[in-house]
Image (spheres, rainbow, N blue to C red):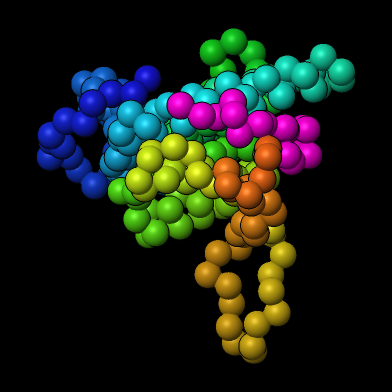
């Protein structure tokens, strides 16, 4: 649940999940642990929260349609921790919205269970922040990553981009190696001014009219 930003207390640079759980809830809710390193998460404005809910609702509608016509089972949620690795909880991120396979009640969501993650980008997000978060998702092997960009002037959803995980390496000159073993490539892009709807076939058929995203 979104929480208001508060003054950040002095904390060590690294923490465990168990130490994080002992913090006040309003503080812990604004922290991710990247391999144990404390990363503060900036809370977006009201427009950010509205866009996040709209996207989650529409993707969930598409997931339900797919489940009604197949034996597959999906869960669509928002602001849910995704843990990396098979054990432990001191390495996680909290996407704005996500799709994962159905799990037992109250089970932790692991990156290996997750098919799609998404972030709503507010004007305050820096390119460094965006690239760092995207790299975390790619490193975790999550197949699909979506970015939702808000209009700077109106606050409405203006652009949606879908990225697919590319685990191959481009051919580079001898002696040069890619900085990261996996990255995303742009696989779809839609703007409210140029396309009537958002349509993408993975991880299940997703069709979202722009009118359903307005607020």
Give the residue at x 57% y 38%. 117
Q: Is residue 102 left or right of residue 51?
A: right
Residue 35 falls within the magenta-colored stretch: no
Give the residue at x 13% y 34%. 7
Q: Residue furthest right?
A: 70
- As rendered, which of 56 and 103 lies closer to the eye? 56
Residue 207 falls within the magenta-colored stretch: yes
- Residue 208 in sight here: yes
Q: Image height check: is 164 above or below 177?
A: above
What count of labels does the image hold? Answer: 0
Task: Point out residue 202 in the picture as x, y percentages from the top left corner.
Answer: 75, 39
Task: Point out residue 121 in the picture as x, y percentages from the top left corner.
Answer: 42, 45
Give the residue at x 46% y 31%. 51
Task: Point out residue 30 in the picture as x, y percentages from the top left corner.
Answer: 29, 32
Q: Image height check: is 70 above or below 188?
A: above
Q: Image height check: is 140 above or below 169?
A: above
Q: Is residue 166 left or right of residue 68?
A: left
Q: Quadrant of residue 178?
A: bottom right
Q: Which residues are magenta?
A: 199-215
Q: Quadrant of the N terminus?
A: top left
Give the residue at x 39% y 59%. 127
Q: Is residue 29 left or right of residue 91?
A: left
Q: Is residue 53 left or right of residue 178?
A: left
Q: Residue furthest bottom?
A: 174
Q: Residue furthest front?
A: 193
- Residue 203 in sight here: no
């Amino acid at each position: 649940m979104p929480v208001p930003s508060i003054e950040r207390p002095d904390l060590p640079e690294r923490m465990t999940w168990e130490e994080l759980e002992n913090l006040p809830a309003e503080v812990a809710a604004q922290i991710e642990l990247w391999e144990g390193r404390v990363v503060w998460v900036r809370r977006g404005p009201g427009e950010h929260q509205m866009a996040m809910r709209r996207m989650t609702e529409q993707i969930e509608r598409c997931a339900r349609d797919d489940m009604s016509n197949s034996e597959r089972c999906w869960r669509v949620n928002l602001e849910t921790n995704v843990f990396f690795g098979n054990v432990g909880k001191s390495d996680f991120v909290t996407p704005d919205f996500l799709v994962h396979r159905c799990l037992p009640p109250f089970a932790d969501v692991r990156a290996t269970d997750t098919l799609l993650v998404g972030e709503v980008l507010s004007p305050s997000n820096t390119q460094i922040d965006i690239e760092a978060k995207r790299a975390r998702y790619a490193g975790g092997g999550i197949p699909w990553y979506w970015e939702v960009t808000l209009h700077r002037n109106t606050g409405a959803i203006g652009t949606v981009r879908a990225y697919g995980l590319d685990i191959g390496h481009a051919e580079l000159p001898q002696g040069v190696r890619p900085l990261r073993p996996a990255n995303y490539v742009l696989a779809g892009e839609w703007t409210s001014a140029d396309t009537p709807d958002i349509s993408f076939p993975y991880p299940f058929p997703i069709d979202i009219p722009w009118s359903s995203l307005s607020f």
